[in-house]
Image (cartoon, rainbow, N blue to C red):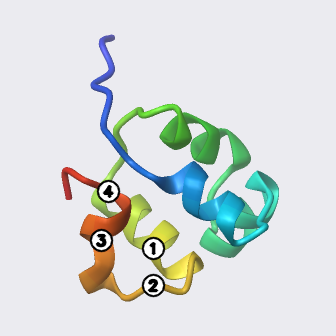
Amino acid sequence: MESSLVHNTVRKIREKLLMSKAELARNAGLSPLTVDRIEKGMDCRIETKRKIILAFGYDISDKGLIFKNA
């Protein structure tokens, strides 16, 4: 299975907010492994992107700031 790499700033924003991967995963209702994969640039479902955006305290309309291909 080939994964497509996507440009995102999840790690940068998470670190700016002084949030651990585990904390982001817990706040977003995701597994830490999913957060790790997303930070490495693997693609994810729209629903997963939505959860991360909201866990950061952003508006859905700010999705382009976090996920460049959104």
Q: Are marks 4 and 3 in contact (CB under 8 Å)?
A: yes
Label whose residue precedes the other's in the sequence (4 or 1): 1
Dot 2: within a 10 Å radius of its alpha carbon, few (fewer than 14), some, or many (20 or more) residues?
some
Which residue does the image show at 54% across and 41% down from the upper left?
A: 39
Residue of label 2: 58
Rendered-image quadrant of the N terminus? top left
Distance in Å between CA atoms under marks 1 and 3: 7 Å
In this rendering, would 14 be left or right of 44? right
**Type of amino acid under label 1:** Ile
Three-letter amino acid code of the residue under disc 3 = Lys
Instruction: Determine which residue is flagged by label 4.
Output: 67
Label 2, label 4: how far apart the Cα atoms are: 12 Å
Say whether disc 1 or disc 3 marks the residue closer to the N-terminus: 1
> Is the C-beta separation of discs 1 and 3 under 8 Å?
yes
**Residue at which label 1 appears:** 53
In the rendered view, would you say 14 is above or below 34?
Answer: below
- Identity of the residue drawn at 29% across and 60% down: 46
- Mark 4: which amino acid? Phe
* Between 24 and 18, the one nearer to me in the picture: 18
- Density class for disc 3 (Cα within 10 Å; few <14, some 14-19, many ≥20) is some
Whether 51 is drawn above or below 45: the answer is: below
Instruction: Find numbered disc 2 in the image and state the secondary structure of the residue it sits on.
Output: loop
Residue 27, located in which quarter of the rendered image?
Answer: bottom right
- Residue at 79% over, 65% down: 23
Looking at the image, residue 39 lies above or below residue 19: above
Q: Alpha carbon of mark 2 to alpha carbon of mark 3: how far?
A: 8 Å
Q: Position of residue 45 (x, y in %)?
A: 33, 52
Question: For the view shown, which residue lies furthest in the top direction?
Answer: 1
